[in-house]
Image: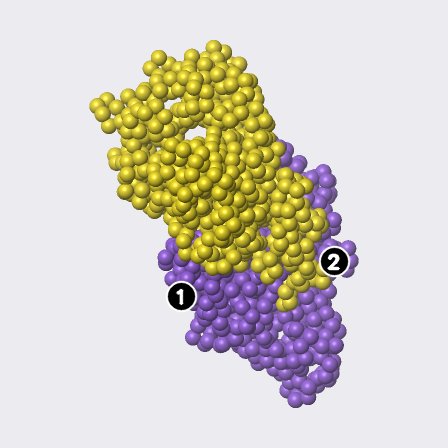
Chain colours: A yellow, B purple
Amino acid sequence: MKPVPFTQVTFTDQFWLPRQVTNREVTIPAQHEVMRRTGRVGMWNWALKPNEFNPPHRFWDSDVGKWVEAASYSLATHYDAELDGQIDAIANHISRAQLADGYFNSHYQNVKPHLRWSNLRDDHELYCAGHLIEAAVAHHAATGKRTLLNAMLRYADHIDRKFGRGAGQWRGYCGHPEIELALIRLGQHVGEPRYLKLAQYFVDERGQLPHYYDFEARRRGHDPRDYWAKTYEYVQAHKPVRQQTEVTGHAVRGVYLYSAMADLALLNGDAELRQTCQTLWQHLMSKRMYATAGIGTSAHNEGYTSDYDLPDDTAYAETCAAIGLIFWAQRMFHLTRDGQYTDIIEKALYNGFLSGISLDGTEYFYENPLASRGPHRRQAWFDCACCPPNIARLLASLGGYVYSVDESSDVWVHLYAQNTAHFQVAGVELGLAQRTDYPWDGAMTLTVQPAHALRFALYLRIPAWCDLANADAVRVIINQTEVEHVPSNIHKGYLRIDREWQTGDTVALRLAMPVQHIHAHPHARQMLGRAALQRGPVIYAFEQVDHPEISAAKAGNANAPLMLDRISLGDVALQPEYRPDWLGGVTVLRGDGWLADDADWGAALYRSAPAQRRKIALTAVPYCVWANRAQGEMRVWMRL
Amino acid sequence: MKPVPFTQVTFTDQFWLPRQVTNREVTIPAQHEVMRRTGRVGMWNWALKPNEFNPPHRFWDSDVGKWVEAASYSLATHYDAELDGQIDAIANHISRAQLADGYFNSHYQNVKPHLRWSNLRDDHELYCAGHLIEAAVAHHAATGKRTLLNAMLRYADHIDRKFGRGAGQWRGYCGHPEIELALIRLGQHVGEPRYLKLAQYFVDERGQLPHYYDFEARRRGHDPRDYWAKTYEYVQAHKPVRQQTEVTGHAVRGVYLYSAMADLALLNGDAELRQTCQTLWQHLMSKRMYATAGIGTSAHNEGYTSDYDLPDDTAYAETCAAIGLIFWAQRMFHLTRDGQYTDIIEKALYNGFLSGISLDGTEYFYENPLASRGPHRRQAWFDCACCPPNIARLLASLGGYVYSVDESSDVWVHLYAQNTAHFQVAGVELGLAQRTDYPWDGAMTLTVQPAHALRFALYLRIPAWCDLANADAVRVIINQTEVEHVPSNIHKGYLRIDREWQTGDTVALRLAMPVQHIHAHPHARQMLGRAALQRGPVIYAFEQVDHPEISAAKAGNANAPLMLDRISLGDVALQPEYRPDWLGGVTVLRGDGWLADDADWGAALYRSAPAQRRKIALTAVPYCVWANRAQGEMRVWMRL
């Protein structure tokens, strides 16, 4: 069971295609430029002129790695000679700067060469290595060029010699998981089981006692109890991973680790590791995830706090964490064939991931709160710039999340978005074409074009947001013939259609897409008495710019926070309205709501009669495109 | 127009009398003991053995002053030889320790004698002097003893020589107002206009340019811009007081200053200062006061933030600020004869002031939030112990807030609480006796007993919480004869009854006391969609201890914050029920409310159906007695 590669899936839609074009034409070039300007690329001669430039930061290699990965994906689908040259330059730089023993880290080599591997807990050396390894695999796959791949094979061998349980080896592992994912990918790419074993070691050594980070801290002359993050939960090393039952600590680190665990569970048929992943997933889903699929409550640890603690205005919900959640979810699907995981891929893609980048592809959110007093705006770059290239690599490879083919040569359709795809099934060339206005419309027609008649099962994901209690929620029509009893034939979120497919057969999916009020578990007190609006996979947000009453109220009371709270939704659902002229073309929600009015209130601060409610016109826009217009308040969870 | 002194009013009720007995028998002795143990009293020989004790803190003299004031009030109504001796010892100590030039400050004399008056902005010297002066006046009034009074007259003369606009004088004023109030009181007590003029100077010099605190900081070698509080709003010295239109900064400092301003406005017939006071009052009432009459939103500055910013769980609402608000309100009433001010005295007394002390008189709140996750509990003492003796002095002198007599010899009744009073009106001895179960019942019968038949107007306060739109809200019966058209005869909150009173005449007041839902102005977003319960003057609170469902929910989810938010009030009003066995005898509110139930919810964090509501039995207790039972959550503003 494998995803159909992104190179074989071409979006032709109005939602993702423009994002991919912007990513290719604006974002990737702009990121190269800012990386050049800041010294991340093109200046790997710091050692020669140490005083002329800021020395490379310990995160920088990972930024470069993610960018090379994104750029390679872009090259793979749209050749661009300038980009090709930029990647080559980086590959050559790295290859030349790499030490004879295979080590490469621009920060350590230039800033503290004598301290290599001395602080795995904090210093991201293996994390940077992992991103460069992923870049090398992507670059080789896209271009067949081996410069970076060979360098990274040397580096992986170096790491393999250095770390492990053998005599003379160090029993370390990285504070920021990533190397595990990368080694699995490299091992699969080049067919070298040694890298998979090393990944397995890194996963299973994590959190073992005596604790490596205690040992490592003492070796540096530090007291382990002085660890700034206070607890190894921050790095998911508070106990061996197979004993972990709750998602803890830094959200991005967590989902990268869990992704590697899911990979290994699948590769090795490791039931225990699969169960651990499922337990962790269930904990996250049931107690710690925002409605946008944002994860990580607090800026303090860039991570989780406690169960059901999901404040909206201070939500951290880092863009990278949504991306890592997508990685994890895809692996969990392939491990379990359960639509609950692909549902979360969809939820994150349309909400907490996509909010991370502006419509014009030039600015980014690091944090994705679900409410804002106004100041929260996307920025062109960050000192710690993990999110921008992470967004770029996911957008450039997004086609890889649409289909999978399993070992029975059955075809799974996970995402609906207009596209064409071509891949082999049981040795037969298969073309697929989706025609749809998803996510604005729930109708999708899939044309199946095998080279010749071919029997296989087609699995269609029926999203969790479909209310199957409603008879019209899902209709499926095969070549004009309606499929009966659809709901009772949905298993783990997929409808199975097993038949001999003729070229030109069509499957029409009709998902009812009402505007839904989403409610949170009663333990999640910050959402009590509130609802979020969702239509299809899209979560909506209310912005000040669409509500002049709010601006008027703030004008007379400049410090007033979150005046959008004066609005309540009322009982009448808002109605969808497609606006091609807004925000790149989006379906907005419009209708009447209520404003707690102060017109008759007078000077008193308290009174025994509640505020009068005045009807006002409401507009909600997709959360993912908020903050692309005038600065102002935003809120997802509205009072009822 | 003056209040009838507390010495002439004796509570005989079940609400205040037990508090006063506890204050006299438990609180005042316990405070003396802790002041002795901590070195605040009895150890004024630090200078002799500097290493043996903690040096006196700059606030300590004010603690001692407030305690002496409280103890003197207690002596005035209930002689106690031991207490008398304790006060004498303090008076003698101070008198002996006072310097030849009249200066006295235990902190400066022992810790930094060379720096006297060098930091008026921060160091509370004049504030401490003020509290000692108030103590001296109270002590002299209670006992006729002059030791402390003479010492403080010398000190006041010293201050009068030091500060002012004359040649060689310093144009300073205290960062924490209090000296102004004290000098006015001293001046009136001994008939010395010089002290009133000095108070007037301190008030009017405040905030003038060039700014004294700038000058003073530079004299200390500091840059005024390095002021830790960032703005002179913190000390209400950001502009001259007559130009101030908004209450700002540290809440206690503010109300002490405004009290002195109101005093001066009345004494001097100063219309401008009166208007300033009214403007400031109106700002506070309409935009910055909690429903409990607590004031000061933030712990950061122990004061105000911005208009309508009234978070409940982080409310500062210092007990001293409620006390200062009562001081200011009483003065505003005498300045304007407007019941809106005495209404606030009542509101503060029954809520945000009284919450400051435990039922057993041994523990105190410094902060009085309107919601708590559980940890907020009263404490036996504080390093900065301003609140405990402040509570003691107000409780001991509470009788002084019940009645006033004006220059026409008319009698004003402000508070309802069973009591007897005896005072002169137009040279005639007048006895008054209130019979009432207020605040649990709105019926009050006042028996008027002049020594002989006497014509005067009796003004009865009709509380603002009475809903005059309701025909039964207020009934008044004089000697069995019902007064007609009561609502239309209420002027500025008082009903005037002008007649010749015979001994034994009775006035029966019947105030309907329904349970009211109180709502906040729509700009106050933290209260949107919420209501507080009030009955008569009493604001109610919900405690975890009365709601096992909340404890059960927290038991399964230990970190869950403010689970009381799962409760909503519903439409049915709770019913009052007097419980003599609870919390010293209180009327609780009981009835059904709704709990957002998770029994059917399942494992999902979000879903499209709202939580089911389950009926649960609710109990609310008066806010002022919360946290006298098992530790747990508390909340005033409940979801509707």
B154 sits to left or right of A50: right
Write the residue at 57% across / 64% down. B531
Q: Position of residue A586 (x, y in %)?
A: 62, 43
User: Is residue A384 positioned above or below A322 on the image?
Assistant: above
Labelled pair 2, 1 in contact (Cβ < 8 Å): no
Q: Looking at numbered disc 1 in the image, what kind of residue is underneath it?
A: Pro
Residue that sits furthest to the left in the current view: A167
The residue wearing badge 2 is: B274
B333 sits to left or right of B147: right
Report helix, strand or loop for mark 2. Answer: helix
Q: Position of residue B605 (x, y in %)?
A: 44, 53
Write the residue at 40% across / 62% down. B599
Q: Looking at numbered disc 2 in the image, what kind of residue is underneath it?
A: Arg
Number of marks: 2
The residue wearing badge 1 is: B548
Which image quadrant: the C terminus of chain B?
bottom right
Q: Nearer the viewer, residue B580 or A572?
A: A572
Write the residue at 30% across / 41% down. A273
If you read the primary sequence from the N terminus, does the residue marked by circle 2 or circle 1 appear first? 2
User: Is residue B179 positioned above or below A240 on the image?
Assistant: below
The answer to which quarter of the image holds residue B573 is bottom right
Q: Nearer the viewer, residue A118 or B65?
A: A118
Q: Position of residue B613 (x, y in %)?
A: 48, 65
Q: Position of residue A32 (x, y in %)?
A: 54, 22
Report helix, strand or loop for mark 1. Answer: helix
Q: What's the distance in space between the residues labelled 2 and 1, CA to CA? A: 51 Å
Q: Nearer the viewer, residue B96 or A489?
A: A489
